[in-house]
Image (cartoon, rainbow, N blue to C red):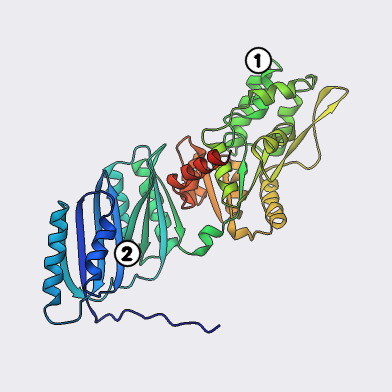
Amino acid sequence: MNDVSQPVQPASVPTLLVKIFGKDRPGITAGLFDTLAAFGVDVVDIEQVVTRGRIVLCALVTMPAGRGLEGELRSTVHSWAESLRLQAEIISGIGDNRPRGEGRSHVTVLGHPLTAEATAAIAATITGSGGNIDRIFRLAKYPVTAVEFAVSGVATDTLRPALAVEAHARGVDVAVAEAGLHRRAQRLVVMDVDSTVIQDEVIELFAAHAGPDAQEKVAEVTAAAMRGELDFEQSLHARVALLAGLDESVVDKVRAEVRLTAGARTLIRTLKRLGYQVGVVSGGFTQVTDDLKERLGLDFAAANTLEIIDGKLTGRVTGEVVDRAGKARLLRRFAAQAGVPLGQTVAIGDGANDLDMLNAAGLGVAFNAKPMVRQAADTAVNVPFLDTVLYLLGVTREEVEAADESDAAVG
């Protein structure tokens, strides 16, 4: 079959911008275009926004052919608008919108709350970097306010560091992603477990069953390791040694004590509906991650394994140690198994031992992370809701809720 060429709107063709605003109600859009249809005009562009029950509808159309028809169109549109207690503005001009500049990005801003001051600062930084804001729309209103700016005229790599500095100063989270089809092509998400998918540090839960002294020592070593002050493998062996002698029944107790991070189920459920594969990697233990894999329907899970002999924890781990380098290695392994290019993966984590994984992924997200991790990652989320990562991928809250309602109806 031969391709059919589509007509291109010449820049010199006279056009009319028809703007309607007022109280929203059903039928406004259809009514406007029914009115315009009588004059044989072609639609060049449409934009409609409804905010707190007020509609702003813009239609860019070609000038009607024939002497005197422009004046008649103006009169007819104004009369139609007045009949619905709407206001109309009609502006004549030439052609379409000006071409967008080279370099296009999606700038996602998360605020809890999102203040006018922060929004002004982000917009000014975009402009000061040489960019133009082509469009703004809201992705979510809770649990955070999330808005997305479509920006052109500046390279993503130039815009990202400038906005990172401003976001930190204003107390908001900003993610800058290059525009293009690849954004929706990210098909594998791999997450850290402790303090990311779950609220807890698993080894501290085990240590709590070994007594207060062990618990305190484990917490101290864990904090130092997450700050990057200790070699992870050495710290792992030191901490696990404090668990020696615990009965294997403690595994079930720890599984019951694990608390999922707010939004974790929603994030994973939504990603799975969208066709993503989802995995976890952990410096913790398979005794917990295997359970999470089954409970949450994950595709991949990897962690260290506590050695258990004769019903007792030996204080050792078996098999390949999952450390900082191991997490990045597992991300690559999962991507190969999933058939997903590494550039189309997303990694999420909070600690220093997540850095290699975050840097290896197409998009690295620092989730409520330590300062050194926030600075090194592509973007940071500093609100306690894991599902806000969806907004960084361009998924709206309305899409999440619609999918939930669809599942409920089928169930």
Q: Residue furthest right?
A: 310
* Viewer-proximal residue among 55 and 187: 55
Q: Quadrant of residue 321?
A: top right
* Viewer-proximal residue among 68 and 291: 68
* Viewer-proximal residue among 326 and 399: 399
Q: What residue lies at 29% left-to-right and 59% top-to-bottom?
A: 30
Q: Which residue is mark 2?
A: 130
Compared across the picture, whether 230 is left or right of 166 comes to right
How many numbered discs?
2
Residue 349 seen: no
Vertical position of residue 280 compared to residue 259: above or below = below
Q: Amino acid at mark 1?
A: Pro
Which of the labelled discs sits on residue 212, or is there none? 1
Residue 214: x and y, percent? Answer: 68, 19
* Viewer-proximal residue among 166 and 175: 175
Q: Amino acid at mark 2?
A: Gly
Q: Quadrant of residue 29?
A: bottom left
Compared across the picture, whether 182 is left or right of 115 comes to right
Q: CA distance from mark 2 to mark 1?
A: 57 Å
Residue 250: x and y, percent? Answer: 74, 21
| Rendered-image quadrant of the C terminus | top right
Q: What residue lies at 35% left-to-right and 70% top-to-bottom?
A: 101
Q: Label 2: how many residues lie within 10 Å, few (<14), some (14-19) or many (20+)?
A: some
Compared across the picture, whether 126 is left or right of 212 comes to left
Vertical position of residue 398 compared to residue 127: above or below = above
Q: What residue lies at 69% left-to-right and 59% top-to-bottom?
A: 339
Residue 46: x and y, percent? Answer: 30, 64
| Rendered-image quadrant of the N terminus | bottom right
Q: Residue furthest bottom?
A: 2
Compared across the picture, whether 80 is left or right of 132 comes to left
